Image (cartoon, grey):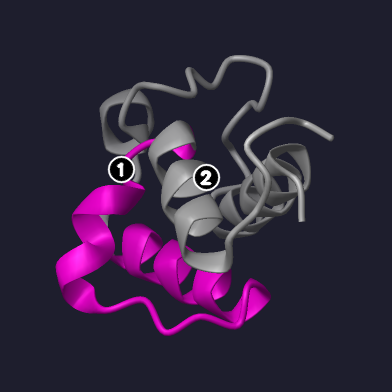
Amino acid sequence: MTRDEIRALTLEKLLQVAPDIDPQQLEAKTPIRDQYDFDSMDFLNFAIAVGREFQLDIPEQDYNKLQSLDDTVDYLQQRIGGSASGE
């Protein structure tokens, strides 16, 4: 799976949890909680949704690796072994 595919699926899960997020305004490197009213329940639902989408068990100690969109994509890419390029 490419990084772009991982990113698209991650963004899709994020928007399912928080439909008020404007993907055009989302700063990929900034923690989501710093940009939006994204509470702990939203974050937990996001982590669960991403885990299900990518068929991963995301341990609670790794939740800090899912702070921003880019952080989440990096983490998922590392876990599932996606390619580094957008190919």
Looking at the picture, how far across and down is residue 72, in whole percent?
Answer: 44, 47
Decide if residue 71 is on the left or right side of residue 22.
left
Based on the picture, tell me whether residue 85 belongs to the magenta stretch.
no
Span colored in magenta: 41-69
Nearest the eye: 3 or 24: 3
Q: Where is residue 82 in the image (x, y as percent from the top left)?
A: 65, 53
Q: Mark 1 points at which residue?
A: 67
Which quadrant would residue 35 be assigned to in this image? top left
Is 25 above or below relative to 42?
above
Q: Residue 61 lies in magenta, yes or no?
A: yes
Amino acid at pointer 1: Gln
| Mark number, residue 18 | none
Q: Dot 1 lies on which element?
A: loop
Residue that mark 2 sits on: 73
Image quadrant containing the C terminus: top right
| Image point (29%, 37%), residue name | 33
Identify which residue is drawn at 47% across, 65% down. 79
Q: Quadrant of residue 13?
A: bottom right
The secondary structure that most of the magenta stretch takes on is: helix
Among the two numbered marks 1 and 2 on one chain, the one whose residue lies closer to the N terminus: 1
What's the CA distance linking mark 1 and mark 2? 10 Å
In the displayed structure, 3 sits above or below 28; it is below
Label 2 secondary element: helix
Q: Nearer the viewer, residue 74 or 64?
A: 74
Rendered residue at 59%/81% (across/down): 52
User: Identity of the amino acid at label 2?
Assistant: Val
Tally the marks.
2
